[in-house]
Image: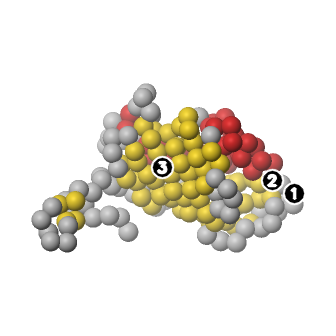
Amino acid sequence: MLPPPLGEESDPDGLIPTPRPPVFPRPPADCTGQQIMQRHCNDCEYPKQRCYRGNHLRIFQALNDAGIDAILDLYSKDPVMLPFLQPAVVGTDAVRENYEGTFQLIRFEVQTTIQELVEMSPEWAYVRTDTTGTFTPTRTGEGAPAVFHELFLLRKTGDEHWQIARYIFSPASALPPV
């Protein structure tokens, strides 16, 4: 469920309204990540420099392509990943090593649905997604259905681009052994 619109929350006594960050509309359910990027960035109701929906969805195409450089281009200079059941992955070199290791073991064919996009300030936003698709261990080559929940904390850089500062994910279904 999305947070209430701006100004609808208040303190317990109702004296001081608590502003809520703007919530951007969810894309149509039938949109793929690529279609969302095209529709949102071509027909955007927000200025392109604020368009983090399209930028964000590029990570899923890069995952499908096992494109480490394309993925790293989407991250900030000080990224942190919080993978499930693993220690935190801190810094660009560690994030690169994590993806290199992942792609040696797994291939993805996924589609994502943005459940929530919230700009918390001019420099920070988060995106909550659900991702479904096929998770294929390279050892067996046998794909299995997979569902993940993700939370991306985005930071706007000096060049007005949104980049992934923090990435948290967990599977929402059993995964095959790698």
Q: In terms of depth relative to the viewer, which is nearer, 112 or 34?
A: 112
Q: Nearer the viewer, mark 1 or mark 3?
A: 3
Q: Amino acid at mark 1?
A: Arg
Please name the residue shown 65% across and 71% down the image. 173
Residue 152: x and y in percent read 51, 51
Residue 3: x and y in percent read 32, 64
Q: Quadrant of residue 106?
A: bottom right
Please name the residue shown 67% across and 56% down the image. 87
Q: The residue tagged with tag 2: helix, strand or loop?
A: helix
Is residue 152 shown above or below 17? above
Residue 157: x and y in percent read 44, 33
Q: The residue tagged with tag 3: helix, strand or loop?
A: strand
Please name the residue shown 57% across and 42% down the image. 79
Q: CA distance from mark 3 to mark 2?
A: 26 Å
Which mark identifies residue 139?
1
Which mark identifies residue 153?
3
Q: In terms of depth relative to the viewer, which is nearer, 107 or 154?
A: 154
Q: Residues within 10 Å of mark 2 (few under 14, many from 20)?
A: some
First-in-chain label (3 vs 2): 2
Which mark identifies residue 57?
none
Residue 49 in sight here:
yes
Q: In terms of depth relative to the viewer, which is nearer, 11 or 151?
A: 11
First-in-chain label (1 vs 2): 2
Total tally of numbered discs in the picture:
3
Residue 43 in sight here:
no
Q: CA distance from mark 1 to mark 3?
A: 32 Å
